[in-house]
Image (cartoon, helix red, strand yellow):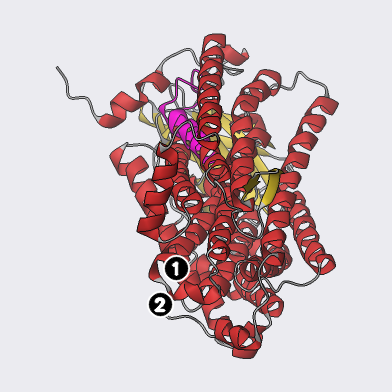
Amino acid sequence: MADVTLADMLSTPLAAEPRPAGGAALDQVAGVSVASMVVFAALVWVAWAHRTRRITWLHRLSEWSESKIGRPGWVTVPGALLAVALVTAFLGFIWDVSLHAGVGRDEGPLANPAHYLILVGLFLTFIAGATAMVLPLDEVPGPAAVKITRAWHVPVGGLLVAGAGLYALIGFPLDDVWHRIFGQDVTLWGPTHIMLIGGAGLSLIGILLLLREGDLARGKTASSLRDLRVRVSYTAAFGGLLVGLSVFQVEYDFGIQQFRMPLRPMMIAAAAGLALVAARVVLGAFGAILAVLFYLVVRIGTAVFVGPVLGEAYNVFPAYLGTAVVVELLALAAPLYRRRLAYGAIAGLGISTLGLVLEGLWVQAAFILPWTSDMWAEGLLMSVPVGVLAGMAGALLGTALTTGDIPGKAVCRAIVVAGIVALAVSLGNGLYATVPDATATVELTDVDSDPATRTVDARVTFDPATLPSDDPTWVQITAWQGDGVVVDQLRETSPGVWETTRPIPVHGTWKTLVRVSDDRILAAVPIWLPADEAIDAEELAAPASFTRAFVPETEILQREKNADHPVWLWNAACTVVAICSLLLLWALAWGAARVARATPRPTTADRHADDRPPALV
């Protein structure tokens, strides 16, 4: 019997044919639905039994964890659950992206092994929040608690974690509905995909608020952060938040982004501005660097497991060390650091300028598609306002988690709304792309001429020869979904003529195309596309020489999408998802403000103590 690797066993279901391009098979939908109802019913019974004291094991677990950790059980138990949940979901997510990039569509939600990890992780996220809500007995869990009934108060953080988890969970069945209506949008940025990853990632803000509520319930002040156990929990939460916010960039990490490059530095500035500024405000000296180190441990561990261990497509990711150093250095200016909003704004500016320059050195060294001078001007114009406002939002979050001395409602709302508007405008600008009235003549030379394993070298001649410009963002050939991912940066051998640097697959289920990104141009020319019965698509052959016109990239990369629906239906569906996402952001901002306003105001001596960076331990 031949040796079978772990990767072979785990990826076998995905390799089966045929692979539908719409929703999952009804038996799989029914199976997931029944399992979800059983789990939900069990959760309701446990919550009822605990609240009515028919069971005692949950209370004993809460007391045991409190005795070991020194924090309320309604903080420690949900915190541990959420840590397991998000690591599980993140591992499943990276594995899932790698599978789809390397192999293509799956047969349904239960045919992809990574989906099990995602689903378990999302359920545990919701369970963590629900546990925080039901655990407190005969006590009001902190001064910010929300009254549910006369005798039942729940911590704000638990409510938000449960809400974020539920929002992400709803995205799972809605994803199948979306595929049935609109076809499979093979991109991380599909609306229902945003629900899945956004809900899970933003649940970390809820756990940060829950940690603070636990401190307040025990009468602890910001100076308690000198306790090692307290610092470790906040460090992990901020590092986890950075992981969650970095998830939106994962297509860039794999080198298969379907969006223009200037979006990347803007997203890095947004993530660093919120997570690292808040970490520095809460943890003091080296807080931003500690959060980044935790982030790197999670990202490196996941990348190694999915890549070398499972044998799937690998990914690299932003280091954030340069941005963390900028945040730390600016905090050394004590007068600025005491003015938290000003510090957040200046730190955000530093992140979105010098910090991005430092990050660019890592991108240049490690990424498949480096940053070029072609995208810097636009990238900075998008990154600076987003970075400044994200830094101010991070300062607000950090202040809410320490002294609670945040500005008035009007100022807080203005910062949050301005940040959302700046992010939306930058996204709209980054997503706008054009297709040139141009063609590409492709000449293929067989390296392996066997039709079952054919690979080729390619020579691409653009007409007009001025396409692309002297410094394009990228000119490359991408081949994916055959049994891996191949991204080859072409080299220009003469004006308008570009050649490959490695053999390119043009057989089987590979989808191979020439891609050009230059200023606002984002377009592609197909080289080889297999027949796809599920979407009634014929094979696009790769003869020795051919000339084809440029088309929008999504027509090739997302050829499974179904255009047979009214435009208003697509717009309405996207609007509903956008509104739900805004409601989640509003809820998180409301929760942070509630915790802040429930925090006892520090004395003058306390203010000076909190301004001094705490020791590392």
Asked if residue 373 lies in the magenta stretch, the reply is no
**Is 546 or 95 nearer to us in this picture?**
95
Q: Give amino acid for label 2.
A: Leu
Q: Of the numbered discs in the image, which one, if any, rests on residue 231?
A: 1
Q: CB under 8 Å between callouts 2 and 1?
A: yes
Q: Label 2 neighbourhood size at 10 Å, few (<14), some (14-19), many (20+)?
A: some
Residue drawn where x is 39% and y is 44% of the image: 61
Q: Mark yes or no: residue 52 visible.
A: yes
Residue drawn where x is 37% and y is 50% of the image: 64
| Residue 425 on image: x %, y % | 78, 54
| Relative horizontal placement of residue 404, taking residue 506 as reference (left or right) | right
Q: Mark yes or no: residue 437 visible.
A: no
Residue corresponding to mark 2: 616
**Is 347 or 406 nearer to us in this picture?**
406
Q: Residue furthest top?
A: 27
Bounds of the magenta segment: 102-125
| Residue 311 on image: x %, y % | 32, 37
Q: Of the numbered discs in the image, which one, if any, rests on residue 48?
A: none
**Is 432 or 126 nearer to us in this picture?**
126
Give me the C-alpha separation between circle 2 and circle 1. 8 Å
Residue 88 in which image quadrant: top left
Say above or below: 312 vs 144. Answer: above
| Residue 581 on image: x %, y % | 72, 43
Say above or below: 543 vs 577. Answer: above
Q: Which quadrant: the N terminus?
A: top left
| Residue 410 on image: x %, y % | 85, 66
Q: Give amino acid for label 1.
A: Arg
